[in-house]
Image: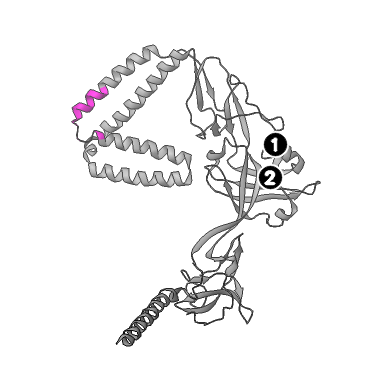
């Protein structure tokens, strides 16, 4: 009886050990043979050259012709015509303040008169709201493109529509009372206004900027056609001191195109094609501008001068000078492939091994561009045999063969 009890205990222990090992095996077996994978995703990158150059503009300085309190009446980057008023010079600060108040009243009067003259259309609330919605979309597009002139224009339209909506349910007699009060206020302010010593006019058509710093060695659109790499380096690195604030109001950029010029070495020059359209991407909060390579010439020191000329976004660059830039030669979009995953199969085809369920499958791919840690591979959604979006790319695994089953 005692012997039977011992045998029973031994059998029980053996069963427990067997069951324990079985459970442990079932837990760890799914991880045996597991490989590291990365999902194939679409990415965009570009081939570029980093430059340290300068924005080149044709410009004319605007001098202060009268002494007193100056009120600039145009915005930074605003387009002006020849003889447009840039600033008004008043006798003192009080005169300047009085005239600013008068201008605000006149603007309010103009807006309220426009609302009053709309007549019955003032009551079309739904139409006003629709107009504001459309203008907001226009403003978003202008902001995305950093089109300063469009931003100013659309912003003024939105203000006008919003003001119209504010008075949509008011009786016309209420608007008449507002107009009367504004006219009375204007009449009082006109008595205190005046004391103008002079006005400053634009010397030519172009874009206004408050920023003007004279250079000992000035570079403009004409000189950039022939400047050597040595002189261009000197211009880029030249120290500039702000002019006496009592001497200049700012400048007028007279050209309607602008250029970016830099010095590059021979290896960089080999990547650039004269006449080709490129992109200029700056580190600052500036738009990416399309430009054409208008000059690529060697200099005596073995370096090259490269000049890219653009026609867009000039109002965003009127105050810029020395700044770094990425010259984007070409953009690429495709599937991201880790460097360690790219392989050659037994037939010499380039591609990657992917995990499809538990089976290894070789998928050929064409490399478009190489980055430090990955490649950009061509993506063709119609070619089911090639690498596809969301495929599981096997990384850094040895002994892989096509159609091998991983258990």
Q: In which quarter of the image is residue 12?
A: bottom left
Q: Can residue 29 be seen in this view?
A: yes
Residue at 46 percent of width and 78 percent of height: 358
Considering only vertical position in the picture, is 24 above or below 89? below
Considering only vertical position in the picture, is 399 above or below 318? below
How many numbered marks does the figure carry? 2
- In the picture, the disc for residue 368 is none
Q: Does the magenta stretch include residue 176?
A: yes
Considering only vertical position in the picture, is 65 above or below 158? above
Residue under circle 2?
262
Residues 141 and 406: in front is 406
Say which of marks 1 and 2 sits in front: 1
Residue under circle 1?
237
Considering only order in the chain, which callout, 2 or 1, is on the residue closer to the N terminus?
1
Q: Is residue 228 visible?
A: no
Residue at 68 percent of width and 45 percent of height: 262
Mark 1 vs 2: CB contact within 8 A = no
Determine whether the residue tagged by mark 1 lies in a helix, strand or loop. helix
Residue positioned most to the front: 2
Residue positioned most to the right: 300
Question: Which residue range is magenta in the image?
Answer: 166-179
**Residue 251 percent across, percent down from the top left:** 58, 29
Residue at 32 percent of width and 45 percent of height: 133
Instruction: Determine the main secondary structure of the stretch shown in magenta.
Output: helix
**Residue 283 percent across, percent down from the top left:** 57, 44
């Amino acid at each position: 009886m005692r012997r039977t009890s011992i045998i029973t205990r031994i059998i029980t222990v053996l069963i427990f050990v067997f069951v324990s090992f079985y459970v442990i095996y079932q837990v760890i077996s799914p991880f045996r043979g597991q490989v590291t994978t990365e999902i194939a995703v679409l990415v965009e990158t570009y081939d570029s050259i980093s430059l340290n150059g300068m924005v080149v503009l044709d410009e004319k300085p605007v001098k202060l012709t009268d002494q007193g309190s100056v009120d600039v009446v145009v915005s930074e980057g605003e387009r002006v015509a020849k003889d447009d008023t840039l600033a008004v010079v008043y006798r003192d600060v009080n005169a300047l303040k009085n005239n600013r108040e008068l201008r605000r009243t006149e603007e309010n009067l103009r807006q309220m008169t426009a609302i009053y003259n709309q007549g019955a259309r003032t009551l079309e609330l739904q139409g006003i709201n629709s107009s504001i919605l459309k203008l907001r979309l226009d403003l978003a597009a202008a902001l995305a493109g950093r089109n300063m002139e469009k931003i100013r224009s659309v912003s003024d339209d939105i203000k006008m529509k919003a003001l119209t909506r504010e008075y949509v349910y008011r009786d016309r007699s209420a608007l008449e009372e507002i107009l009367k009060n504004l006219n009375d206020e204007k009449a009082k302010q006109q008595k205190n206004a005046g004391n103008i010593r002079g006005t400053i006019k634009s010397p030519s058509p172009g874009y206004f900027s408050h920023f003007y710093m004279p250079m000992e060695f000035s570079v403009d659109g004409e000189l950039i056609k022939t400047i050597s790499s040595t002189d261009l380096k000197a211009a880029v690195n030249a120290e500039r001191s702000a002019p006496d604030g009592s001497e200049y109001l700012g400048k007028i950029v007279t050209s309607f195109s602008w250029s970016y010029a830099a010095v590059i070495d021979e290896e960089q020059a080999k990547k650039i094609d004269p006449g080709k359209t490129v992109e200029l991407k700056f580190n600052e909060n500036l738009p990416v501008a399309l430009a054409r390579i208008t000059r690529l010439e060697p200099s005596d020191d073995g370096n090259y001068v490269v000049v890219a000329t653009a026609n867009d976004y000039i109002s965003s660059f009127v105050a810029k000078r020395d700044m770094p830039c990425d010259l984007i030669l070409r953009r690429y979009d495709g599937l991201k492939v880790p460097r360690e995953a790219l392989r050659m199969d037994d037939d010499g085809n380039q591609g990657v091994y992917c995990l499809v369920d538990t089976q290894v499958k070789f998928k050929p791919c064409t490399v478009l561009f190489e980055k430090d840690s990955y490649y950009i591979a061509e993506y063709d959604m119609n070619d089911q045999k090639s690498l596809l979006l969301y495929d599981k790319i096997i990384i850094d695994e040895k002994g892989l063969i096509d159609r091998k089953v991983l258990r």
